[in-house]
Image: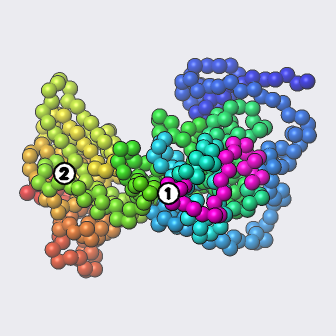
C-alpha cells in the first residue's frame, strides 16, 4: 500500500507547502495553511482522470472539432424577470454560463436567487434549487413568504457533487442554483468542505456541467472580512460572471454590481429595495437617492456618477469642523479615503482653504459607494460649502475630475450625464472645459435641452467653486 503524504494548502492563494507555517510564503497571509492528506490514486483512476477528468461531471467532447463544423447555439438570452438584474448580466442569462453571486451574510443573496428561480420556473421551465445550508422545508417557508408557488421549482438539500449532477441529468432543468459553493463537496478530494481545494474543484466540475448541458448555473459564495469571496480569488477566474450584492444592512437599498462578465459590460449596477415581499427593483434610483435631500443645508452637493452604462445622481455630504485634538480627523463613508486626502491637499494649496486644522467628514447618502473620479468636483464643492458656511444651489449638479494642479479634467460620457441631470429637474450643471466639454455642450444645445437648463464650463477648481458658491 502506498504511503499517505501530508501537505499544507493555503486557503487564500492555493499554494502548497510541505510543512506548516504561520505565514504563507506565496501570498503573505497569516494562519491560512491547513493540513490535507494526499491520497494516491490507483492506475485505473489515473487513466480515467487523464482521459475524462476527475469525475463523471466533467465528461464532454474528447476530440477537437474544426471551427466551421461547430454549430452555433440557437438559444437566445433568457430574461430572469427583473430588468435591473438583466442589465447587470448584459441582457439576460446566456445558456451554459456559470455565474458567481457574492455578498455579505444576510444581505439577501438567497432571497434574490429564490425570486429569480420562481420567475424562471414560471416563464421558462423547471429550475433546480440546491440548498446545502437549509432543509427543503426551510426553503419552502421562505418561498411562501415571498409568494413563490411555482410547480416547476424543484428543491434539493444536498452537498454531494455527484448527487447534484445526477439530479441535473434526470431533471434537465433550465436553471440550476447552488447555495452555497462552500458547502458542496467532491468525493475524490479529501480536504474539508469550504477549503480552497474543495471549492475550486467543485466550481470546475459545475463549469463542465454548465458547458456540456448548456444550462446556466448560479453559485452563491460567502464573503470574508476582507470583502473577497471566501476561499479563493481563483473562483473569479473560473466563472463567466461575478456579481456582488452590496448595501448597508440597516439600509433598505441593495446594489447588484457586476465585476466580471464575459458576455456583457462590467461595472453595471442594478438597484433593489428590500421590502416585506422580498427584493423589489428600483427603476429610477437617482430620484430615490435624492428624495430625502434637505434643501438649505450647507455641505450638500449632487454628483453624477456613471455606473456601467447608467448615470446616477447621488447626494454627497461633507462636514468640516475645527479639530479639538492635535491631529485632524478625516472620515469617509462611500468615498475612497486616499482620494479625499488628495482633494483636501488640492483645496489647501490651490484654492486657499485652510482645512488642515479641521476635522473633515464625507458621506455618500443611501449607502452607495462611489469610485469614479468624476465625483471629485462635487466632493470638493461640498467641503468648501461646509467650510465657508455658504449654500450650494439645490438645483446644481457637478461633474468633473480634479488634478493635482487644481485643473478640471475631462470625463467620459458627458452628454449622457448632463441629459440625466436635466431630466430630473436640475437647472444648472458645471462641467470641465477640457477635452470635448465645449463641443458636447454645443451638441446638447442643438439637440434641445429645457429652456431653463444651463450648462457651465469651468477650467479650474477655483473657477468652479466661485460659480457654485455664488
Q: Residue at left 75%, top 47%?
A: 163
**What secondary structure is marked by label 2?**
strand
**What secondary structure is marked by label 1?**
loop
Find out whether the residues at labels 2 and 1 contact each other: C-beta distance under 8 Å.
Answer: no
Q: Residue at left 72%, top 50%?
A: 164
Q: In which quarter of the image is residue 464?
A: bottom left
**Residue 1, relative to residue 417: is it above or below?**
above
| Residue with the mark numbered 2 | 300
Q: How many marks?
A: 2
**Figure quadrant of the C terminus:** bottom left
Q: Residue at left 29%, top 53%?
A: 375
**Does label 2 or label 1 sit earlier along the sequence?**
1
In front: label 2 or label 1: 1
Q: Which of 130 and 8 is in front in this view?
A: 130
110 relative to 320 in the view: left or right: right
| Residue with the mark numbered 1 | 146
318 relative to 231 in the view: left or right: left
Q: Nearer the viewer, residue 36 or 64?
A: 36
Q: Which of 309 and 108 is in front in this view?
A: 108
Q: Where is residue 58 in the image (x, y as percent from the top left)?
A: 77, 51
Judge whether residue 156 is colored magenta: yes
Q: Where is residue 91 in the image (x, y as percent from the top left)?
A: 52, 67
**Figure quadrant of the N terminus:** top right
- 10 Å crowding of disc 2: few (<14), some (14-19), many (20+): many
- Which residues make up the magenta segment? 143-167
**Residue 50, relative to residue 89: is it above or below?**
above
Q: Which mark is residue 451?
A: none
Q: Residue at left 51%, top 49%?
A: 109
Amino acid at each position: 500500500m502506498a504511503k499517505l503524504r501530508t501537505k499544507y494548502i493555503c486557503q487564500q492563494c492555493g499554494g502548497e507547502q510541505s510543512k506548516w507555517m504561520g505565514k504563507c510564503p506565496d501570498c503573505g497571509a497569516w494562519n491560512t495553511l491547513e493540513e490535507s492528506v494526499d491520497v494516491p490514486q490507483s492506475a485505473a483512476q489515473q487513466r480515467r482522470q487523464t482521459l475524462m477528468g476527475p469525475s463523471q461531471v466533467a465528461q464532454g467532447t474528447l476530440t477537437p472539432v474544426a471551427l466551421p463544423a461547430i454549430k452555433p447555439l440557437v438559444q437566445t438570452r433568457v430574461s430572469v424577470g427583473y430588468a435591473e438584474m438583466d442589465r447587470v448580466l448584459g441582457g439576460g442569462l446566456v445558456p451554459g454560463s456559470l455565474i458567481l453571486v457574492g455578498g455579505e451574510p444576510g444581505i439577501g443573496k438567497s432571497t434574490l436567487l429564490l425570486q429569480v428561480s420562481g420567475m424562471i420556473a414560471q416563464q421558462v421551465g423547471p429550475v433546480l434549487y440546491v440548498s446545502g445550508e437549509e432543509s427543503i422545508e426551510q426553503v419552502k417557508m421562505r418561498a411562501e413568504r415571498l409568494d413563490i408557488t411555482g410547480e416547476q421549482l424543484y428543491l434539493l438539500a444536498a452537498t454531494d457533487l455527484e448527487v447534484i449532477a445526477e439530479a441535473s441529468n434526470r431533471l434537465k432543468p433550465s436553471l440550476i442554483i447552488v447555495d452555497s459553493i462552500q458547502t458542496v463537496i467532491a468525493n475524490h478530494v479529501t480536504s474539508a468542505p469550504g477549503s480552497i481545494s474543495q471549492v475550486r474543484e467543485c466550481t470546475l466540475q459545475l463549469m463542465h456541467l454548465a458547458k456540456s448541458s448548456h444550462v446556466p448555473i448560479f453559485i452563491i459564495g460567502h464573503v470574508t472580512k476582507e470583502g473577497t469571496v471566501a476561499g479563493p480569488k481563483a473562483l473569479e477566474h473560473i466563472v463567466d460572471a461575478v456579481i456582488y450584492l452590496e448595501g448597508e444592512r440597516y439600509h433598505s437599498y441593495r446594489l447588484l454590481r457586476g465585476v466580471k462578465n464575459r458576455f456583457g459590460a462590467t461595472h453595471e449596477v442594478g438597484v433593489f429595495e428590500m421590502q416585506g415581499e422580498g427584493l423589489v427593483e428600483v427603476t429610477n434610483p437617482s430620484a430615490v437617492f435624492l428624495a430625502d435631500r434637505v434643501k438649505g443645508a450647507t455641505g450638500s452637493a449632487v454628483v453624477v456618477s456613471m455606473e456601467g452604462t447608467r448615470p446616477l445622481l447621488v447626494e454627497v455630504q461633507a462636514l468640516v469642523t475645527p479639530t479639538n485634538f492635535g491631529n485632524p480627523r478625516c472620515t469617509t463613508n462611500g468615498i475612497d479615503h486616499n482620494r479625499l486626502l488628495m482633494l483636501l491637499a488640492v483645496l489647501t494649496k490651490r484654492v486657499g482653504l485652510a482645512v488642515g486644522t479641521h476635522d473633515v467628514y464625507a458621506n455618500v447618502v443611501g449607502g452607495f459607494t462611489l469610485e469614479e473620479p468624476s465625483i471629485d468636483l462635487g466632493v470638493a464643492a461640498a467641503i468648501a460649502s461646509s467650510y465657508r458656511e455658504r449654500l450650494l444651489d439645490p438645483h446644481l449638479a457637478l461633474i468633473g475630475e480634479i488634478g493635482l494642479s487644481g485643473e478640471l479634467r475631462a470625463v467620459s460620457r458627458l452628454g449622457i450625464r448632463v441629459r440625466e441631470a436635466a431630466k430630473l429637474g436640475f437647472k444648472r450643471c458645471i462641467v470641465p472645459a477640457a477635452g470635448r466639454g465645449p463641443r458636447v455642450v454645443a451638441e446638447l444645445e442643438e439637440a434641445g435641452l429645457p429652456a431653463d437648463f444651463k450648462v457651465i464650463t469651468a477650467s479650474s477648481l477655483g473657477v468652479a467653486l466661485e460659480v457654485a458658491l455664488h
